[in-house]
Amino acid sequence: MTTEFQRPNIFAMTGYTPGEQSADPATIKLNTNENPYPPSPQVFDALQQFDAAHLRRYPNPTASDFRLAAAKLHGVAPEQIIATRGGDELLRLILTTFVDPGDSVAVAEPSYSLYPVLTAIQGGQLFDLGLTSDWRLAPDFVDRANKARCKVAFIVNPHAPSGALMDEASLRTIAEAFNGLILIDEAYVDFVSNAGHDLTQFAVKADNVVLLRTLSKGYGLAGLRFGYGIGHARLIEPMLTKTRDSYNLDAISQSLAVAAIQDQGYIEETRRQVIEARLELQVALGALGFEVAPSHANFVLATVPRSGPSALSIYQALKSKQILVRYFDQDRLRDKLRITVGTPEEQHQLIKALREILQRD
Amino acid sequence: MTTEFQRPNIFAMTGYTPGEQSADPATIKLNTNENPYPPSPQVFDALQQFDAAHLRRYPNPTASDFRLAAAKLHGVAPEQIIATRGGDELLRLILTTFVDPGDSVAVAEPSYSLYPVLTAIQGGQLFDLGLTSDWRLAPDFVDRANKARCKVAFIVNPHAPSGALMDEASLRTIAEAFNGLILIDEAYVDFVSNAGHDLTQFAVKADNVVLLRTLSKGYGLAGLRFGYGIGHARLIEPMLTKTRDSYNLDAISQSLAVAAIQDQGYIEETRRQVIEARLELQVALGALGFEVAPSHANFVLATVPRSGPSALSIYQALKSKQILVRYFDQDRLRDKLRITVGTPEEQHQLIKALREILQRD
């Protein structure tokens, strides 16, 4: 029966697998890149002050207040911002708006596993252009993407799962040469070491670049489902006025997102703590024989010591000790673990457990 | 530039126009079918008890608690329920999952103006089969829909904007004869006069029917953006595991939606009040010379008196008195106004204003 009704591309595809969650509060979760710190106190206040009686009415359809606040923060115009239900909705809207079924979409694997899923839903053709050994786009990325007539390229920067960062100059060169639209997924940009890294002015001036931002990581609001896109108004406009679900964001999340984005002092403070803890994690893993790629995100990608147990065994051994990290059964990643930066205490527990597993007492 | 990047169907289409909102709290809003009453006290409690610290973590990806609560309420299995960001997300998922670009989609205009918009986004062909003079599906609806090879039919029941109700037997006959999938949009079902009207058992047993429910109307939660679908698990499954955005519902709305759906006593009470007020509104409009179609929704469709000013003039005159109702510049509706059932006080103000406009003092 399902075959009869489902579209062939939907029937053939496999859905996205969400990260492992645990109902046990004692579990140390270092597997889904959540922020180790809670959201801003301003978010707690906004939640307490929200009057449920307002829920009777439809919310603001375009999240105007949030878009104003985000525009002010980035020094751009509200017309250059679209607010979305998590960054994921923006990824979908990019495909819905700009990619016809059959069109090619460029990615560079390994990257966010949702890109292929969303491309399959849209009936697009995935065109994987690979990465260099240090997790950067291959030098002929644009040539090959243009030859394949890719309409959209998804580039995650900082890169996941490695944490590598491409700078503005490289991205500008790519954008200028690429015939399609580039979605730069900046889910982890709030953890970049270089505080001067800021692509927003480049993005709104280019005519084929949209930046993806999310409150899930840097703002400690994965549970709120709130993200946004920044780009030229002519790229934002069809998503804002046509392809977006008409009331995509509820009234409570709009109110909390405004509170969160306006408290940049708090974000700076947690950012500083995460960057500090990331360095500590890199050093501690290095001391245990892991090879750790430099990271600009709130996770590190660690190659397990050659002489010891496999990455899969270590992942399983950690899990039996109620510590979740991420193992990818995927090319180039099978000897690695992606470990989210945690609180100092969580990291202490992790290192202690790894020491036991690797028998490095 | 936009023409270059946008898909041709997106470039050609017009987006959905959300209902008029007013920033002035003194405005009487009877134009977007919001509930005149606030959500259940349990929703207020759930909001107060929600700890913002939980927002750090990703929410439950499939809204399991809500689906369990909804399944219990309807006497179906959780696998027969999908929770969505408003009913609108379910409409989109039906198209994404079951309608290929170029496929036909059956509607019966006038109905919810979002159906054509979503069909255009998906690149589907809209096939309007019209309605009888008393707002029912034409007798040859299925024959024509089958001949046009429609993959999906959107049927709103109770009908909007008339409030007419089709019974289970008629819908069963249609479902059995139709070769495609039927989405029965029950956005207004919580206001049906006949308390015994319940299509859920029919829907989960049929192999081509999905019911749409929303908390926006009956539960007074338009601002929360929460709805759900009920149908055969084999129809629900691909939407739940493949085409739905991976975390489509935030943690707060999941918690509040569970609280709302579990307080059926409160819903019964507001339903009773709305049905009573609807009758009063029908009588009062009738006394002023309007012809009012029988309604099973929280609105009435009123044909303006022949001798007086036009529907458009009355709409404008009401607006100048800070009362919003809905005027449709559309075939069969230009001599009518759709008026949301309000509180007794709001309706009193409306009738007073109409009396002045029609000079029936």
Image: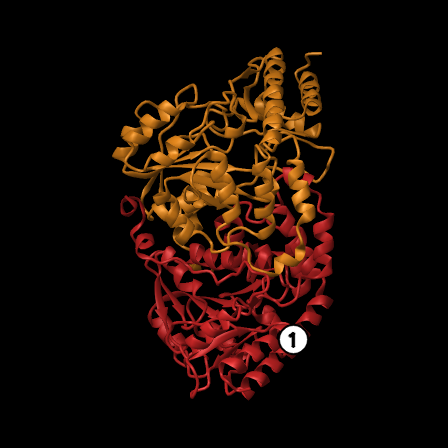
Chain colours: A orange, B red
**Residue farthest toward the left in the current orientation of the protein:** A147
Side of B20 where B332 appears, left or right: left
Pick the residue in front: B337 or B111: B337
Q: Position of residue B248 (x, y in %)?
A: 55, 48
Q: Please, is residue B68 above or below residue B131 in the view?
A: above
Q: Give x and y (percent) for residue B349.
A: 60, 75
Locate residue B55, reporting x and y percent: 64, 41
Screen quadrant of the C terminus of chain A: top right
Query: Which amino acid type corresponds to the residue marked 1 in the rendered image?
Result: Pro
Q: Is residue B115 above or below residue A170?
A: below
**Residue drawn at (70%, 56%), measured in percent from left and top?**
B43
- The chain carrying label 1 is B
Number of on-image labels: 1
Residue A312's place in the image compared with A61, above or below, is: above
Is the residue A234 above or below the residue B198 in the image?
A: above
Q: Secondary structure at mark 1?
A: helix
- The residue under the point 58% across, 84% down is B284
Q: Residue at x 57, y 64 (%)?
A: B213
Near-viewer residue (A111 or A242): A242
The answer to whether residue B340 shows anywhere in this view is yes
Neighbour class for label 1 at 10 Å: few (<14), some, many (≥20)? some
Task: Answer yes or no: is residue A3 visible.
Answer: no
Give the image quarter of residue A323.
top right
Judging depth in this view, the residue of A269 and A177 nearest the camera is A269
- Residue B280, horizontal then vertical, whole percent: 62, 82
The one of A357 and B50 positioned closer to us in this rendering:
B50
> Which residue is painted at 63% across and 14% down in the image?
A284
Q: Quadrant of residue B259?
A: bottom right
Q: Is residue B156 left or right of residue B348?
A: left
Residue for badge 1 = B344
